[in-house]
Each structure stands twice: as structure tokens, then as C-alpha cells.
Image (cartoon, rainbow, N blue to C red):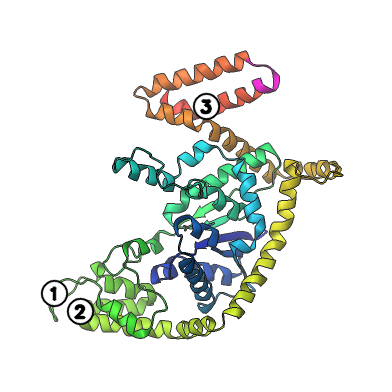
Amino acid sequence: MEKKTVLTGITTTGTPHIGNYLGAIKPAIEMSQSGEYNNFYFLADFHALIKCHDPERIAQSTREIAVTWLALGLDTDKATFYRQTDIPEITELTWMLTCMCSKGLMNRAHAYKASVDANRDSGKADLDDGVTMGLFSYPILMAADILMFNADLIPVGKDQIQHIEMARDMAGRFNHTFENLFTLPEAVVDETTQLIPGLDGRKMSKSYDNTIPLFCSADELYKLIKQIKTDARAPGEPKDADNSTLFQLYSCFANELEVAAMRTRFEEGIAWGDAKKELFEFLDAKLVEPRARYNEFMSDLGAVEDILLKGADKAREVATPLLEKVRIATGIRPLTYTSQAKSDEKQKKEKSAEAMARAEEGRRRAILMQLQPLLDQVAAADDQSAAAQNAIADKTAEVASLKKKAKQKAQNELDLLQEALAQYL
Ligand code: TRP
């Protein structure tokens, strides 16, 4: 069987911290080492511009993230590691997909809705206050990141699941409208790695300002660990390991035996100060080598730039031919182009059952995307059953009034509408 393609992007606005390492970087590097997948990992620097207008921050974050992945052992022969902005094909595909994406779909994106809600809550007259088109249409750029490499599996945090669904919608609509060129991607969410606690015990996150940077100095690391919240239990009193941030962080890096031994020490009443010292020494020992590599790469950024450019070449070997097909499929062609090649290709495609299933899935998604506002209306109605019946009656009348191609299109919509509304009838 062909290897599945795993792809993920990291927005270049922050300094990599322990939560990023355990939640995203480590599993991604392991996936690339397993040899079971094609791996595409990239610095999402166009995404950075959506929420950060500090050029120095973006430039520095891009360095830090690139160097972090290399210092932690990403083998760039085993994974394609690149910077989004080195792949012009992604930007071009973004436009193609923008034309395949209902505005209503973007209205429902969480990030946009959160801004609108915040404006409403603060009594602003303009609900779109402070919303750029970048924020509004960012799921389209993200869809292009993914579809450009026909990625199957997208490891992401929970907050990103909706974006992967949207990428599926856009892929489906494109496949249905033009030609079956895109794989429908799937989100992969690892629940266990979502729970890395930060200094205050909440999820470690830049937005809570409770992170431990991966490659700060040993002194800084100890200083931060000393800030971790503990309870008031005195030395000698048994400690609750499961509710201790110190213990949880230790467990993220330790093996089973080490975890069990530390648990015993908590039960025996280890002093908090000692627990902090132990955690520091343990983490520092794990980080000392990658930290040295990090500092080495940081003092040789030219070499890192070369690695990224090589990665971009590799990525473009995939992106360029696919984008060429996308252009041809949509009618952006040399004047002399004849479609013989295309009909050959069509026949070949039709043989594959998988391709047919993909096309069918795309057809359904494309239709559902257009019906979604109607489905939302029914779901929000006081009398859902009556609303569902009305919606179906209206569509039935529309089918009756139309002819030929338009009639078939409306009939397809009616079929899916009946299916989607059956729950209310
Ligand atoms: N938006 C993602 C985040 O904030 C980062 C990202 C950009 C991404 N493009 C992507 C993740 C493509 C997966 C696939 O985390």
C-alpha cells in the first residue's frame, strides 16, 4: 500500500516551549522516523501575519522554530521541512480554493466567530471591527497548505479540527466541480498530549503566559520551575502526585520506572523544594544535548537557511505538477492546449473504485456546503419539524419548476436535504 502523507504547520509567532515539544514536535519527529509515512512539516509564516504585525517577532520566531526542529533531531532526508512562503504554489492554490469556498462557510469559522462575539460583547456597533480579510479567510490558506501536498493525515490541536473539515469541503467542491485532484484530509488529534500543564497548572499555552521555553538557559529553566504552583503541604507530609504540575511534567519526560519511583517519593512526603530541584535536574539532563545543538545552529543560520531552501525544492517537486493540473482543470491553460490528454486521464481515473468513492464524497460535500445555511436555519427553528417540512416543500417546488440540468442539480440538493433533515421529521 502507498504510504500515507502526514502534514502539519507551525505558525511562526512564538518561542517553542515544552508544551509544543511534547504535543506536536516530538510526535511529528517520531512519525518521520518510523518510515511509515511521507512527512511534510513546515513553518507557516504567512499564517503568522494574520495575528502578528511585529516583523522582528515573526523573523525571530521563524529562526527559533526552524532551529528547534533541527536541534531535536528532525532528519530532513526523512521529512520534507520547508517554509510556507518559499512555495509560491500554495498562494496560487489559495486563490483557486477561495473561488471554491462559500462565504457562509467562512462566516462559521471559530476564529472569526470569536472576534465577532467579542465585538458584540463589548457593545461595538461594527461586529467586524478589527477583523482583517486574512483572519476571515485564513481557513482557505490552511486548506491550500494541506491540499497542495494531497496530505491524508493532519496532526493538530482540537481547535484546528474545524479547519481540516473546511479543507475537506473545499477539496470536495473542487473535485466535484472540475476534476478529482485532491485527497480529502483527516485531522489526527492526540488527546493525551493536549494536557501538558504550564507554570500555573493550566494547559501550557502562550496565551496564558505560563510556558517553559524549551531552550532557555539552565539557570532560567530552574528559575521557572521554582515558580510552578504547589500546595501548602509541609516536607514529610504525603503529596498528591496526580494533582501536582511538577509530577505531571516529570511524567511527560520519564519512563514508567522513573514515574513509579517519583510517585513513591511523593507519597513519602518529598519537600516541594526538593521536588523542584529533581524536576530541574531531570529536565536539564534531557535538554542539555539538544540545547547545545540549538545554540550551534543559531550561530550558523546560513546553514539552516540552506536546509530550508532544499526542503522547499523538495516540496515544490510535488506542488508544481499538481498546481499545473489544477490550472488545466480550471481552464487556466496555454492557448494551444487541447484536451485529449485530459480525456485519457479521465478514463484512467474512472477505473479506480477509490477515486469514484472520493468523487462521490466530494459531490455530497459540495452540495451540503451550499445547503448549510438552510440546515442551520432549520436547526435553529422553534419548530424544527415544521421548518424541515417547509424546506423540503420549497425545494420540491423548485425541482418541479426547473428543466434539465438545473432540475437535476436541484433534485440532487433535494435528495441530500431530505437525508440531512430526516432527524427532524
Ligand atoms: N493554523 C495552524 C495552527 O494555528 C497552523 C497551520 C497552518 C497548520 N497551516 C497548517 C496546521 C496546515 C496543519 C496543517 O496551529
Please state the extent of the stretch shown in magenta in the rendering.
402-407
The crowd level at tag 3 (other Cα within 10 Å; few <14, some 14-19, many 20+) is: many
Q: Name the residue under label 1.
A: 233
Q: Which residue is drawn at 31% across and 70% down?
A: 248
Q: Name the residue under label 2.
A: 272
Using the image as rendered, state which of residue 359 and residue 210 is in the foreground.
210
Snapshot quadrant of residue 180: top right
The reply to whether the residue tagged 2 has its Cβ within 8 angstroms of ligand 1 is no
Residue 361 location in percent, x, y?
60, 39
Dot 3 falls on a residue whose secondary structure is: helix
What's the distance in space between the residues labelled 1 and 3, CA to CA?
61 Å
For marks 2 and 3, the one nearer the N-term is 2
Image check: 233 left or right of 8? Answer: left
Relative to residue 384, is residue 192 depicted above or below?
Answer: below
Dot 2 falls on a residue whose secondary structure is: helix
Q: What residue type is labelled 3?
A: Leu
Q: Which residue is drawn at 29% across and 42% down?
A: 121
